Image (spheres, helix red, strand yellow):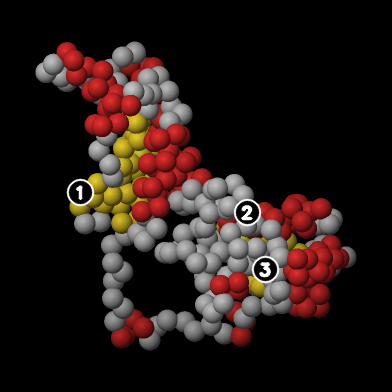
Amino acid sequence: MKSFLLLFIISTSIFAQNTYTHDVYFDTDEYNVPLTEENRLLLFISSLDSVKIDKVSIYGFTDDRGTNEYNLELSQNRANTIKELFSGYGVDPNLITNVNGKGEILLKVLNEEEVHQIRGLNRKVEIIVNEQLPPKKTTKKEKETIVVNTDDNKEKTTEDIKSGSVKKGDKIRLDKIYFKTSYSYVTSDSKKTLEALAKILVEKDNLYFTIQGHVCCTQNSRDAVDKKTKKRNLSVSRAKYIYDYLARKGVDKKRMKYVGMRRKFPLGGDPKYDRRVEILVTYVGKEN
């Protein structure tokens, strides 16, 4: 893309109180994002850290050259590329509700010298982010119906796994397993605890579970950036680290899943306690 074209690029704008927009521009016949455009996109995504997102819509377009069939496919590929980038940098894919290729934008110019510039502006993806509406205020009567946790909802420990006193739905916080700040590997003083956990889970082969990764210190339930990969999926990387470790130690992969919880459930206090993983029991079979 020619450098002078960038002069015509309009940066992120807010056209309504709770709606944010951004355009990403592409080279001719390409659906890979140019580096300058990827950097602009990352700035836009970063600006959403304080926004509670309701939904994201992504629409791809092309210039007027090429057949209708070709342009539809190219515009869809461009939209799909932006969706992948959004997901890779920590935006929940479930929030991306529309990913559509709209095909070509007809050329409308008054001056032949503008043709190249206008076509460049038509090779784009439009992103529309809608913010969540403020939550409805809970009345006093509604508050009285909220269920308070009972003893059955208390978190379990690895000792409960060892004794066989866990059931489906129980959550085990892995105490003394902490992660290096902004990375997905554990601190050196956590390795003995992790090794002990692996031995217990190899022995209790009737237990099936999901490993849930957590992060600290981000805003509005966002995931954190993994400094190693530069992607905003640190909670997933931490869960996978534990998954891979347990698999190497002999825990059957069929018994395990892993998922990133971002910062949905902060514990408060020292941030190190939010750099954690927990185990959610999904099935308990009969012991052999």
Three-letter amino acid code at disc 1? Phe
In the picture of the structure, the residue carrying the numbered disc 2 is 237
Secondary structure found at label 1: strand
Q: Residue furthest front?
A: 3
Q: Quadrant of the C terminus?
A: bottom right
Secondary structure found at label 2: helix
Q: Nearer the viewer, mark 1 or mark 3?
A: 3
For disc 1, the neighbor class at 10 Å (few under 14, some 14 to 19, many from 20) is: few
Three-letter amino acid code at disc 2? Ser
Alpha carbons under labels 1 and 3: distance apart? 43 Å
Secondary structure found at label 3: loop
For disc 3, the neighbor class at 10 Å (few under 14, some 14 to 19, many from 20) is: many
In the picture of the structure, the residue carrying the numbered disc 1 is 15
Alpha carbons under labels 3 and 2: distance apart? 14 Å
Give the x, y percent position of residue 197.
Answer: 79, 68
Residue at x 60% of width, y 72% of height: 272
Residue at x 46% of width, y 59% of height: 222
Total labels drawn = 3
Give the x, y percent position of residue 195.
Answer: 82, 65
Q: Nearer the viewer, mark 3 or mark 2?
A: 3
Query: Is disc 3 in contact with disc 2, using a CB cutoff of under 8 Å?
Result: no
Three-letter amino acid code at disc 3? Tyr
Q: Quadrant of the N terminus?
A: top left
**N-terminal label among 1 and 2:** 1
**N-terminal label among 1 and 3:** 1
In the picture of the structure, the residue carrying the numbered disc 3 is 178
Residue at x 47% of width, y 82% of height: 147
